[in-house]
Amino acid sequence: MKFENLLAEVGGFGRFQIRTFLLLMIPRMTLPFHFLLNNFIAVIPSHHCDISSLDDGGVFRNLSWKDRLVVSIPVGQDGSPNSCQMFAEPQYHLLFNSSNLTDLPTVPCQSGWIYDNATFKSTLATEWDLVCDKRRVNRATATIFFMGVMVGAAVFGYLSDRFGRKRMLLFSYMSTTLFGFASAFSYNFSMFAAMRFFTGFGLSGISIISTVLCIEWVDIKHRTAVGVLISLDWSVCTALLPAVAYFVKDWRYLTATVTSPLFLAMISWWWLPESARWLISNGKVDTAHFYLSKCAKVNRRQEFMADIKLEVLSKVIRVDNIKKKYSYVDLVKTPRLRRLALLTGIVWFGVASTYYGISLNVIGFHVNIYLTQFIYGAIEVPAKAFIFFSLNKIGRRLNQIGTLILTGLCIFCNMFIPQEKGLFRTGVGALGKMFAEAAFTTIYLYTAELYPTVMRQNGLGYCSFIARLGVSVSPLIILLEEVWVHLPSTVFSLVAFAAGLTASFLPETNNVRLPETIDDVEQTRRRSISTSDEKSP
């Protein structure tokens, strides 16, 4: 008997799996909330110099606020006050001739800035004056956060294969909660940057462990559905985030608000199961029997587990050396696994870099930031629906290839649409984002099915690490527009095409048993099972 047969007998997709799925949705809400939080807390509102230092106690004080701005701050090309410069002293003649601005001495803002708080009550920029010369520091907050996500992917990938899924999931809940609230109450920017790094570190564990835990408890028939549905929470919460941000306009309160679901997640953790696959693979047969019996009871199939002895259970997954502890080094020790690591790394890099490249490059919808963010989340839902039906019809590999190539084509075609055709550019860009999201949904499920149980978290951790490299590179690629306006789009298109071509060398996993050991990957034996085989004793 194989583990897939055993899982089918106790219920491969019943009340137990649905409960597990719903319990994991609670912490996963925080993923898009924090990943996209910078869109709201790092906004730089309209601002100009604080001109109180020019108050000479005489004429200046008697001027209206509008006239004070005229004599104190030069105007930009668009007619708005300069954000970073002010006159060295009041230029009263501008009240009568505002067109003569040549050779007037200006200095950087002397007493700070005054910000437009109409949309945001408080942001990082207004809190610590991260504008003008410090504008790049404000932008660096997203990079620092994703560096934490990148490091966390590597660490949690290894630790969850070493110490178990459930235990490390709790650690990721606790660390994210601690550092998330520490971010909200930071008293200077250096502290905030450090806390955001460690918040990203903890969130990475929630992301990769929750995905694997769901996949390992579901039978072959329902793996696709669960893989797509567990990623649907990203799109839903992406659309929900602007509603939360609309009512919570202070960056400290907003950061605390989007972290708060983890308190409920820590309570619900007690009802989460450990992965029975991981337990058996690591010789913990007693505990695996406990969770499988609980699964059978909740799914109302407890009669079957009553007849299963521990000796039989220990043989459903063939393990060569129970005492062996696997690490990232094992990814490159054997030829087929080494080849798999190389191919999946390239595909993950391509998927992540093009997804975030499109997100940063799509022409705006010319609406306010809240509605824009809602649309960006909503347009991903059709991609999920498409993938849900196509993954079982044409398989994982063709879906991965197709979505990446279509993403590249959308980016490429947008190069030839004139700037004045803003509506068409927006439509093609949004279509590209849909295909990029479809590629992301596919690669999570695909990767979980490609790596063996003993190396699954290591494999997904490594791939997530490579993906974050792609995320970090995307802003740098966009800067290439200073060399040639179409160079970023050209690079993103080539990256998407290269990743699609690389995906064509990966094996198909549709309707195939999950590999349990490295030998299952190295050997070329057939692992496909039919419905009848799945139910056989």
Image: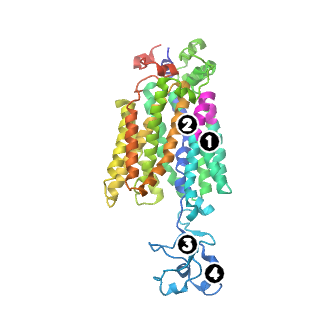
Packing grade of label 1 (10 A; few <14, some 14-19, many >=20) is few
Packing grade of label 3 (10 A; few <14, some 14-19, many >=20) is many
Answer whether residue 382 is visible to the viewer in this image: no
Answer whether residue 68 is visible to the viewer in this image: yes
**SS of the residue at dot 1?**
helix
What separation in Å lies between label 1 and label 4 (alpha carbons)?
Answer: 53 Å
Q: Is residue 437 magenta?
A: no
Q: Is residue 377 above or below residue 163?
A: below
- Which amino acid is tagged 4? Asp
- Which amino acid is tagged 2? Leu
What separation in Å lies between label 3 and label 1 (alpha carbons)?
Answer: 48 Å
**Of tags 3 and 4, which is closer to the observer?**
3
Q: Is residue 367 above or below residue 502?
A: below
Q: Which residue is mark 4?
A: 55
**Disc 4 + disc 2, Cβ < 8 Å:** no
Q: Earlier in the sequence, mark 3 or mark 4?
A: 4
Q: Which residue is mark 1?
A: 264
- Which disc number belongs to residue 85? 3
Residue at image coords 64%, 53%: 192
375 or 114: nearer the viewer: 114
Q: Which residues are magenta?
A: 151-170
What separation in Å lies between label 2 and label 3 (alpha carbons)?
Answer: 50 Å
Q: Earlier in the sequence, mark 1 or mark 2?
A: 2
Residue 59 image position (x, y, % from top left): 60, 87
- Which amino acid is tagged 3? Gln
What separation in Å lies between label 1 and label 2 (alpha carbons)?
Answer: 11 Å
**Of tags 1 and 2, which is closer to the observer?**
2
